[in-house]
């Protein structure tokens, strides 16, 4: 049985047997990552699925809808998690910041293809521009946590909070270039390592 489509997913359309919406989206993300979104046509997607160019429109209305669904998959997971952690005022800001970074790594691993596509978005379309705007909003939430932690005295205050948040997310995002599910490093180990290095450094205390 296919899963219920998530918010922002490809709209349900009557398709030919053999492909549900989730499968079409997964295969489309793979093609977008492999050859680039701008260089991919609906004909390319049809060939990937073993369909004719006209038949693929029984499954999706356009490649832009697929891109929007893919970017929303990554952004919805990040946005909901980071926002929820930031709003947990019972914990100090530094603890929330650690949790946000740790969870961001786990989301990256769980949604690796979609996150990879998100990180390659350059704003060449309205869909990508909207995604980048959402990314900036998430960066802003993280930067606010950094500022709060600086005010609490748990983080150094001689580095601009926005720069710190960019460096933290940069460390997380760089994992898409080398991390492979099922490899020698699993999600928990990766999340613990990045969080530990970011907050505790590499030198022995």
Image (cartoon, helix red, strand yellow):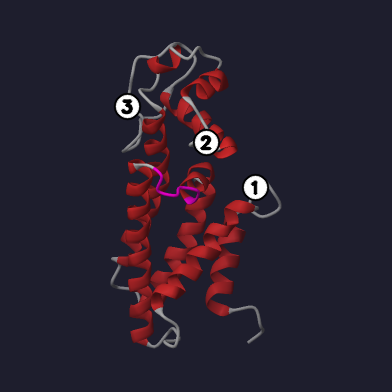
Sooner in the amino-acid sequence: mark 2 or mark 3: 3
Q: Residues within 10 Å of mark 1 (few under 14, many from 20)?
A: some
Q: Dot 2: what SS?
A: helix
Q: Picture coordinates of residue 17 (x, y %)?
A: 46, 11
> Which callout, 1 or 2, points to the residue nearer the camera?
2
For residue 46, side relative to residue 151 (left or right):
right
User: Nearest the camera: 105 or 31?
Assistant: 31
User: Nearest the camera: 154 or 146?
Assistant: 146
Q: Residues within 10 Å of mark 2 (few under 14, many from 20)?
A: many
User: Nearest the camera: 101 or 3?
Assistant: 101
Q: Dot 1: what SS?
A: loop
Determine the CA span between mark 2 and mark 3: 19 Å
Taking the spot 59% from the left edge, 56% from the top edge, the residue there is 175
Sooner in the amino-acid sequence: mark 1 or mark 2: 2
Q: What is the tally of numbered marks visible in this picture? A: 3
Region rendered in magenta: 119-124
Residue lying farthest to the right in this orientation: 184
Sooner in the amino-acid sequence: mark 1 or mark 3: 3
Taking the spot 47% from the left edge, 52% from the top edge, the residue there is 107
- In the picture, the quarter occupied by the N terminus is top left
Magenta run includes residue 78? no
Residues at circles 1 and 2 in contact by the CB criterion of under 8 Å: no
Residue under numbered circle 3: 11
Q: Quadrant of residue 56?
A: top left
Determine the CA span between mark 1 and mark 2: 18 Å
For residue 202, side relative to residue 124 (left or right):
right
Determine which of the numbered discs, if any, sits on residue 180 in the image. 1
For residue 46, side relative to residue 4 (left or right):
right
């Amino acid at each position: 049985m296919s899963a219920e489509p998530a918010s922002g997913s490809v709209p349900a359309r009557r398709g030919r047997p053999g492909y549900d919406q989730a499968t079409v989206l997964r295969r489309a993300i793979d093609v977008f990552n492999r050859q680039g979104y701008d260089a991919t046509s609906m004909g390319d997607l049809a060939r990937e699925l073993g369909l004719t160019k006209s038949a693929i429109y029984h499954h999706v209305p356009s490649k832009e809808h697929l891109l929007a669904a893919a970017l929303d998959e990554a952004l919805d997971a990040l946005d909901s998690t980071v926002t929820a952690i930031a709003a947990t005022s019972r914990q100090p800001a530094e603890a929330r910041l650690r949790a946000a970074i740790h969870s961001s790594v786990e989301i990256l691993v769980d949604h690796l293809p979609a996150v990879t596509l998100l990180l390659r978005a350059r704003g060449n379309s309205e869909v990508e521009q909207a995604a980048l705007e959402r990314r900036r909003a998430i960066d802003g939430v993280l930067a606010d946590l950094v500022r709060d932690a600086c005010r609490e005295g748990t983080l150094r205050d001689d580095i601009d909070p926005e720069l710190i948040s960019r460096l933290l997310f940069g460390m997380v995002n760089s994992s898409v270039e080398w991390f492979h599910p099922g490899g020698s490093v699993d999600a928990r180990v990766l999340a613990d390592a990045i969080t530990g290095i970011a907050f505790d450094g590499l030198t022995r205390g």
